[in-house]
Image: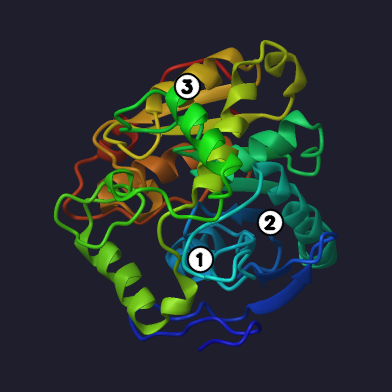
Amino acid sequence: MLLPSELADLSVNPVPEGGRVIELRTSDHVRLRAAFWPATVAQPRGTVCLFQGRAEQIEKYFEVIGDLRERGFAVATLDWRGQGGSSRLLRDPRPGHVRRFSDYLFDLEAFHEGVVQRFCPRPWFGLAHSMGGNILMQLVRARRAIWMKRIVMTAPFFDFGAFKISRARIRQLSTLLCALGLAGRSIPKPFRKNAIVRSFEGNPLTHDRDRFERTAGLLEFHPELGIDAPTIGWVRAAEASMRWLGDPRLAFSVTEPILMIGCGADRVVSTAAVERVARRLKTAAYVGIPGARHEIMMESDVLRDAFWASFDAFIPGSDARPPARDDAAPGEAVGAARSLSRGEQS
């Protein structure tokens, strides 16, 4: 069992050198685990604040942290409330639960004050995956994301993916069940397919077996870092967070440059919803990566290269590129990225 001040260090997934773990307390009294790594260059290009998706943990992103540091950035990150090394919100630690998505803004407030302002060289950028993208959009909409100069979102969770029932029906059912006192219960088994992924075969997350098994091995050694399916209350909170994305006023309240990455083979979130939101925002751009599953930063090398090419083109000063691989044709990674909407790109 890890202490709150520790990171899991495995031979197949070692902790990047030079970092520090920081324990935070939110204003609503939730304990969070955060971490910071300085850049590996004398003159950092800034700090990338890395925000994970549902059911993830800091350790899963060690490779990504290394990629960002190689580009000259410092990296700051945290485990959201209810997952990773942060406090759970229910007596049973396994279900993924939150009362409402706006509660995650307390986590961002504590992270900004306790990590970013204390340790991180400017300028500050955001890199958010899945649920992290939804949370950052709430921060942007509330006009509280000004401290991030630019934001990249991968497969942001703006709508459910391969659900067989409509969002209106999800709202009705989750509201009813929560009213009956079942908010803390896990979602029914028929809806857990993409929420709990145990086997590499047919998984909706990545084509890369090694990266998939690396995460599986982490959770085998440290099951306390993992969570299972979301609760009914979490689903109700997620659906509520999506409704305001259809508000016409959203287009006028967002001024931060945002790059949204859509994954062409994503079954976890709706790629169409990502593109739709990006097209409505005046300062957003959309890039689609054909064939990529939900976790583009954990994907096979050629698909990851397409992501990093887009990241490098959007985040100022990150002129480093991943080393060329013998099995990649010239221009293969860049050619896989397809820009589909206007937006500030430099």
Location of residue 99 with respect to 29 vertically, above or below:
above
Between marks 1 and 3 in the image, the one whose residue lies nearer the viewer: 3
Task: Give the CA distance from mark 2 to mark 3.
Answer: 40 Å
Between marks 2 and 3 in the image, the one whose residue lies nearer the viewer: 3
- Asked whether the beta carbons under mark 1 and mark 3 sit within 8 Å of each other, the answer is no
Secondary structure of the residue carrying numbered label 2: strand
Residue carrying label 3: 168
Location of residue 246 with respect to 128 vertically, above or below:
above
In front of the other: 61 or 346:
61
Crowding near the residue tagged with mark 1, few <14, some 14–19, many ≥20 C-alpha atoms within 10 Å: many
Sequence order check, earlier mark of 2 and 3: 2
Residue carrying label 2: 47
Secondary structure of the residue carrying numbered label 1: loop
Residue 189 percent coordinates (x, y): 30, 50
Q: Is residue 318 visible?
A: no
20 with respect to 156 (left or right)? right
